[in-house]
Image (spheres, helix red, strand yellow):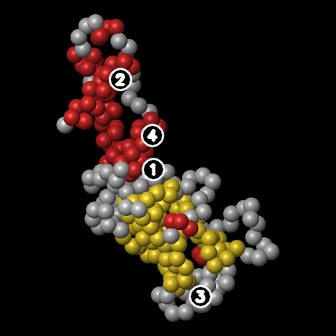
Amino acid sequence: MAVLTDADRKAIYAEFMSDASSVHEHLGDMLKADLRALINAVDQWIDDNQASFNNALPEPGKTQLTTQQKVKLFMAVAKRRWEVS
Amino acid sequence: MASGDTLVVFTPLHNEPPASALATLDTRNARPCLDFDADADEEAVFSGIMPQHYADTTGVTIHIWWGSSTDQTTGDVDWEFAFERIISEVTDLDADSFAGAQNLDADAPGGGSIITEDTLAITKGANMDSVVAGDAFRLKVRRDADDGVNDDMTGDAELYAIEIRET
């Protein structure tokens, strides 16, 4: 899968700022361009490390789960790590 | 009226939201405010009557009280103000006729969750759609959020009050 389109990255950017605004969450000293660069970097990192992530998965999940299921699992683990930290 | 005297005051509760791209009514610590998104232009509109004591010598100065929803202290917000004069037996209620927008490039507040006040002088005549004493009028307030040069503050801009003074 290729990196997200500019429109998709912009949607993340809008949603991220909207969510932060709704709970008055400080975003450091970042300007809009800084946030866009962050989103671009995260998307690029995911794209660059997709194969590495998949190779780290044990069988049978590695071959039996769909890509969407693997992504969902990744998000669940990342979210829990954030919640308990 | 003397220069510096208050002519009209608007609060978020006076907003007449446009049909689309509207700033959102919100509260912060129970204070009503209008949230203007950071990624797309949004607007608020206020109706008023220019008081009879408006001298129209120089024009008006708009004072805007606003804050950052994410407590940003860096970046700028590009505020725009546009007047629409409402003329008896002339103005078509089904159409907008705002004058050209007047820009205010405002710095993010100085720290934390504090409010900030910025001002913009607007000269009389065409820049105010020729609003004079006794005229009904509307004032549109807009955040030009997609101005990549002049609007770079992340997060919503919260509008708390507008004061129009005699310049």
Residue that badge 2 annotates: A72
Q: Nearer the viewer, mark 2 or mark 4?
A: 2
User: Please, what is the three-letter code of the amino acid marked with disc 2?
Assistant: Lys
User: Please, what is the three-letter code of the amino acid marked with disc 4?
Assistant: Ala
| Chain designation of label 1 | B
Marks 3/4: CA–CA distance:
46 Å
Q: Nearer the viewer, mark 3 or mark 4?
A: 3
1 and 2 marks on the same chain: no
Q: Does residue B163 appear in this view?
A: yes
Position of residue A59 relative to residue A52, above or below, is above
Residue that badge 4 annotates: A11
| Chain designation of label 4 | A
Labelled disc at residue B54: 3
Position of residue B119 relative to residue B27, above or below, is below
Q: Residue at x 25, y 7 (%)?
A: A59
3 and 2 marks on the same chain: no
Badge 2: how crowded within 10 Å, few (<14), some, or many (20+)?
Answer: few
Image marks 1 and 2: residues in contact by CB distance under 8 Å = no
Q: Which of the two discs, 3 and 1, labels the residue nearer the N terminus?
A: 1
Is disc 4 placed on a helix, strand or loop?
A: helix
Q: Which of the two discs, 2 and 4, labels the residue nearer the N terminus?
A: 4
| Left or right: residue A2 compared with residue B12 | left
Q: Residue at x 50, y 70 (%)?
A: B11
In the image, A42 versus A16, the foreground residue is A16
User: Please, what is the three-letter code of the amino acid marked with disc 1?
Assistant: Asp
1 and 4 marks on the same chain: no
Identity of the residue furthest to the right in this view: B89
3 and 1 marks on the same chain: yes
